[in-house]
Structure formats: C-alpha cells, structure tokens
Amino acid sequence: MQESGCTKPVSVREMRIESLPFSSIPSQSKLFLEYQKDPVSLKRYYPSAAASPSRIADRPEEVLSNYKVDRTLLCDALARINTHYEAPAETLANIDLLRESEAVAVLTGQQTGLFTGPLYSIYKALSAIRMAERLRDGGVKAVPVFWMATEDHDFKEISNAFSIDSSGALFESSFSASEGDEGKSVGAIELDASVTEIIGELFDSLPSTEFSDSLKDEVGRSWKQGTSLGTAFGHFLIRLLGKYGLIVVDPRDPALKKLAAPIYAQAIRANAAIVSAVTRRSTDLNDSGYAAQVLVEDDYFPLFYHTDDGRRVALRRVEDGLFQAKGEKTRFTTDELVALAEREPSKFSPGVMLRPVVQDYLFPTLCYFGGGAEIAYFAQNSEVYRVLARPVTPILHRQSFTVIEAKHARTLEKYGLKFSDLFAGPDQLLPEIVDRFIDPATATIFAEAEERIDSELNRLDQALANMDVTLAANLATRRRKINYHIAALRKKYHFRRAEQDSDIGRRITAAFTDLYPLGHLQERTLNVISFLDRLGPAFIDTVYGAIDLDDTGHRVIYL
C-alpha cells in the first residue's frame, strides 16, 4: 500500500508487549499445548520437530537432497502469477533467488477469505517473512511463500469479514455466490457487481479517518467485479505485504498442476497405504488422549476430483476396488486415476492430509507456519509423508497477537483489568466491575443480606433437624430456591446498574467487541481493514516489528 500520509510504525521500544501462555487461553487442544511447550517430546507424531526456530537452519541439506522439481519451470510460473498480482521488485527478486539451487522456502498458507479473512492470515504471512529474513541473516538463502488455498470448496468459511464500525460495534461484510458456483473451488468464483456495494457499505460503517479514502481505493483495486476470489485475495495480499518480498502461490495454475502430477500419481497408487496409516495414527492419537483433527474413514481418498462444470467433489472407494466421484456416475480403477493425473492433473486437487506433501514436493520447504488446528492435523499427515517417502516438514506455530489500542488500554487500566480477564466473558466480568467501581455499597448490602439469611437458615435447619429430619430435608430444597432467587435478583441488578452508567457499559462492551469478539481471540474474528483504517498502513510494520519467533505464547501489543 502507499505510504504517503500514513503514521509511522511504532517501534518495539515504544510498545508494551506481554506474552500469555496458550494454556491460559480457553479452547486450546491438549496436543497443541504440549507441542508448544516441548515439540521434541512429540517426535512420535512430528518426526522433524524442532526445539526452537533456530534449529530450522540445520535442515537445508536434507531438504535440498530430496528436492527434484525443475526450479526454472516453478519460478517461471511464480513470476507469471505474482506479476499478474502487480508484485513489486522485492517479490520478483525473491522469485529469482528461489531459482538458485541452494535456496529454500518458508511456507504458510490460508483459505482465500473476503478481504483476506481474519487477521491470522496476515500474521501467518508475516511469520514466514520474518523467518526467511532470519535465515538469510544466518547465511541461508530463504524466501517466504504464501500458499493460497484456492482449491477448497467450502465457500461459507471464506465469504465474510468482520470489522469494527464507527460506533464500536461488530460489522459483518458478506459476499453471496451465485447458485451456479455451488461446490466450485472458491478461488475460481468471480466477484459480481455486488462487491462494489459491499465495499461501499463497509467504508460507510467505518470511522472516517485520514486513511479511509486511499484504503477504499486500494480495496477496490483488488476486490472488483469480474475478478476471481483467488486473484482478488492474491492481489490485495501483495499490496499489503509485497514490499517484504512475499511470494504468493495459486495452486490452480496449470504449470504448477503439471509439476505436481508425479506426486498426485504416487499418492493415487499408495491410496490404500495412506488411508491405513492415517487411520492407525488417528487411533493412536485418540488412545493417547489427543483428539484426531481430521476424520479419515475407510473409503477416504487423498485427492478431490474436479468435474467438467467446475465442481470439486470427493472421491471415494466403492466396491470391487473402484473409485467414484460424489454425484458422478463414472467409476475409475487405480490405474485409470493415475493415467488421468498424469494427463490432466487439473482434474485433481489434494485433500487436507495430502496438501502439505504437495506443497513440499513443489517447493524446497524448510518449515511451515500454521495455526493450532494445523499443528494438530500435522500429527496425522506425517504418516502421509512417511508412506510417500518424503522428508517430514516441521511445523511452527504462527505468531499470535492481540492489538490493544490506547482507548481500550485505558479502559482496562481504569477498572483494574488484565487482557486475560476478558476470557471470563461479559456476564461474569460486568458484575464484578459494578460491585468494585460503580456501587460497592449495594454490593455490601447484598453480601450482608446473604450472610444473614444463610445464618438464620442454619439456625432453622438445626431446630427442624432435632424435631423431624424430613422437615430439614424440605428446608434444604427451599434454601436452594431462596439462594437461586437472590442470585437472579443480583444479576438483574448488576445489568440494570450497568445500563444506568452508560459510560462503563459502552467502554466494556467496546473492549470486548474489539479485543475478544464473539468470545474468540481478536485475530480469529477481525479483518485487517479495521486496523488499516484507524492506524494506517504502518499497522503492518508495527506488527512485523513486534514478532518474536522464539516466543511461543500469545503476544499482546499495547499501542
């Protein structure tokens, strides 16, 4: 994006950054938490696990000795793709660097969400960029690569984007595909005239800042009628991060498909062994107290089939060792599928278990940056690497951030809160704030009343128990009802009192909406456009400057 008129990035020395262990954050899987704590202890599932990012620099020889793809053909395709996205000189220079026989790649990727989807897509890319830079500083020729998951067909997952409007509320932008696009690879779906209206509504909702007009123009240049979702995503990502030399990949490219044909064919031949190995691994994970991330059934097939009308459908094993695409009549033998993959590789795309292997076949991948769910399913698909005799790529958790702007920092400070206190949710936190800061006198009255009622009920209980135990049992039942009604009254009081104090209600609600929206980490819900609109293009530089690859926690940035 253009830098003119933007604020300067905040230097790390000017920022306060805290790190929270993921164990303190709700809804984290056991496998992910143990991997973050000590990945090497899980080598049974992650054969190439690295104790720290610095150990990744030990892998180039292993990676390069197993890399067989024609770099010229690969990089010619990358140059064409990225030039189409109007990539700057930094990206094109990295593509040229990748042509060299000793160069390696740091990969990450994500589905092609509307306006780049949740913030973690940006954080993934920045993590790969920082790792490549660190490797180059250590003498390893490395480039950052972002694999757009344009072949996925779950449109619902990528069709919306959330931002914070001028009132501090959550605003949802949403794009609807036409009926004829159902089941197609999302990257191929074209934006229609409604995208202009969607952008207009988005910017009407956002606060008007010195950055709004230029940002709206930038968004409109990428997300426009007649452009595919894949192209719009790639173009906008390059506009945001191209200056760092990020290389963007669209796996639908015909040249890349042709290069991937051998690994497709190999996976088809080994499909039974893949299913058997991943099924055993899934059972092993479950038996060891971990949840298998991906369900692999007996009829599973590692590749999807693309129909003549553009739909992406699952292939399944049917009787007599034949395979059939869902909704299609034609059945294939293994040999027929192999021949088709070699002749028309565009008819196939890898499923989630095979996709990392395909990525690392096409690229000399040193490591991959993923999220918690990806780390979990890498414990399963490491078996696919083994079956296909490929070196297992180590996965590192992407950098994870919550950005707290000054107004929310002031709110937290005023009410004696830490960011982690928001995990309790507004229903629990708001009553505590009312009792501590708004009306402690009434809170004292409630506490004293409850204590006195409890004391009198205890006296009554003792008297009744001495006379008739059934009466004491009846009192116990009524005591629970009394306590329930007092608690309900207190809850109603808390929320009515918070409504009367409009300032606290507004500030706490705004903090939850921006920092822990919909009960999830900010990065899992909000889109980057909110921050670009409020903070300018320097927001990206600020986050990049806050990256610490050796920190495995969730980093909270106070601006």
Image: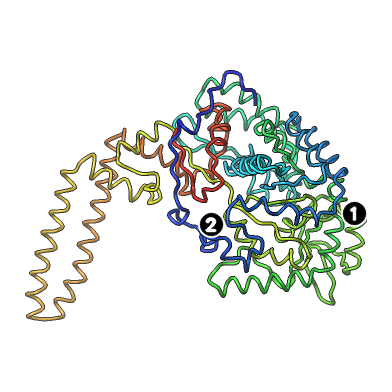
Q: Quadrant of the N terminus?
A: top right
In which quadrant of the rendered view does residue 264 lie? bottom right
Of residues 481 and 104, the one drawn nearer to the viewer in this rendering: 104
Disc 1 residue type?
Answer: Glu
Q: What secondary structure is marked by label 2? A: helix
Picture residue at 50% right of the left edge, 26% below the top? 207
Q: Residue at x 35, y 33 (%)?
A: 410
Q: Residues within 10 Å of mark 2 (few under 14, many from 20)?
A: many
Q: Position of residue 106 (x, y in %)?
A: 69, 47
495 lies left or right of 402: left
Q: Nearer the viewer's eye, disc 1 or disc 2?
A: 2
State the residue at coordinates (75%, 52%).
359
Q: Is 417 placed left or right of 314 in the picture?
A: left
Q: How many marks?
A: 2
Q: Tell me whether circle 1 and circle 2 mark residues in contact (CB < 8 Å).
A: no
Say if 344 sits above or below 224 in the image: below
> On the image, numbered disc 2 is attached to which residue?
36
Label 2 amino acid?
Answer: Gln
Relative side of 169 to 357, left or right = left
**Coloring applied to the structure:** rainbow
> Which of the 4 image quadrants contains residue 461?
bottom left
The residue under label 1 is 344
Measured Cα–Cα span from mark 1 to mark 2: 41 Å
Residue at 56%, 65% (x, y): give it. 41
Judge whether 207 appears above or below 110 on screen: above
Q: Secondary structure at mark 1?
A: loop
Report x, y in % for residue 165: 49, 32
